Amino acid sequence: MSVKVLILEDNPVAREFLSRVLRESFSDPISITEAGDLETARAQIALTGPGGLHGTDPFKLMLLDLELPDGNGLELLNELRQYPATKVVTTLYSDDEHLFPALQCGADGYLLKEDRFEVLVDELRKIVLGQPPLSPAIARRLLTHFRLGAGPAAQDATPAPTLSFNATVPSNSQAGKPPVPIERQVEMPHLTPREIEVLTYLSKGFTIKEIANLMGIKWFTVNDHIKSIYRKLNVSSRAEAAVLASKQGLV
């Protein structure tokens, strides 16, 4: 019997990428069901068999995106606290505001979609060994968080310094790639460091594929970053985004 897996992801290219990662990760036969929004995912989960959400043949693994057209993946995580599946968040966001709420809502793992194919395969394989699948950057972030704020008193006295972790943008660590100055990250705190980097390249006229090559990530990841930038800045075009970037001194 095949292992049933659900992928909740609104980007069709990302869904196909995650499907390939899954098929490479497990030697057992797997049956993958895809959903592009919360409504479809809920319907698929309810159809896993009679007897309520658990059903008689429930999903064994779920890959859940957070930002969806009809809501947030955290909603589904909350609803599925008692569901007998390994639930892994697959997202672009590595900040505390997304990571810790996801873990508190019952996520069994947290993977970054922009990680290399081989990294994601290795992390998902840990499920078979009973280990939590965590992207390396997320594992480091958790260690840093608990080392710096081991108790409530420490957390109250010194809030987790988001910028101290994000000060080095990973994709800029390779030679020949222009760095994004730290002080400019502070000027637009509602954008993640990766989004600021994408916005900088976007404002300079680079295409999505060129940005992907410069940052060492997939083009559909760049596309997701751009959608997030537009939403956060309340703009609908590259030109509008470029104007705001210019005002912030990014170009």
Image (spheres, rainbow, N blue to C red):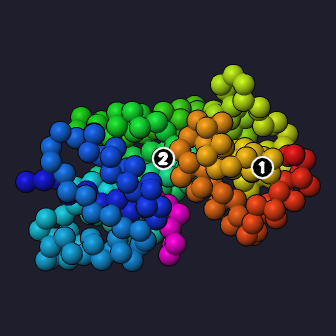
The residues colored magenta run: 64-73
Identify residue type, mark 1: Gly
Q: Nearer the viewer, residue 70 or 147?
A: 70
Residue 22 is at least partly visible in this image = yes
Q: Which residue is farthest top?
A: 175
Residue visible at 64% across and 50% down? 208
> What is the distance, in whole Å, between disc 1 and disc 2 at their CAs?
25 Å
For disc 1, the marked residue is 205
Other-residue count near label 2 (Cα within 10 Å), few / some / many at <14 / 14–19 / ≥20: many
Task: Examine the structure image and report whether residue 71 is included in the region drawn in magenta.
Answer: yes
Left or right: 207, with 9 as reference point: right
Horizontal and vertical percent for residue 89?
A: 43, 53
Residue visible at 74% across and 50% down? 202
Task: Examine the structure image and report whether residue 111 is included in the region drawn in magenta.
Answer: no
Left or right: 69, with 230 as reference point: left
Identify residue type, mark 2: Lys
Mark found first going from the N terminus, 1 or 2: 2
Horizontal and vertical percent for residue 147?
A: 57, 31
Left or right: 135, with 192 as reference point: left
Q: Nearer the viewer, residue 141 or 201?
A: 201
Other-residue count near label 1 (Cα within 10 Å), few / some / many at <14 / 14–19 / ≥20: some
Horizontal and vertical percent for residue 246?
A: 89, 53
Left or right: 108, with 154 as reference point: left
For disc 2, the marked residue is 113
Badge 1 marks a residue whose secondary structure is: loop
- Of labels 1 and 2, the one closer to you: 1
Residue visible at 37% across and 50% down? 18
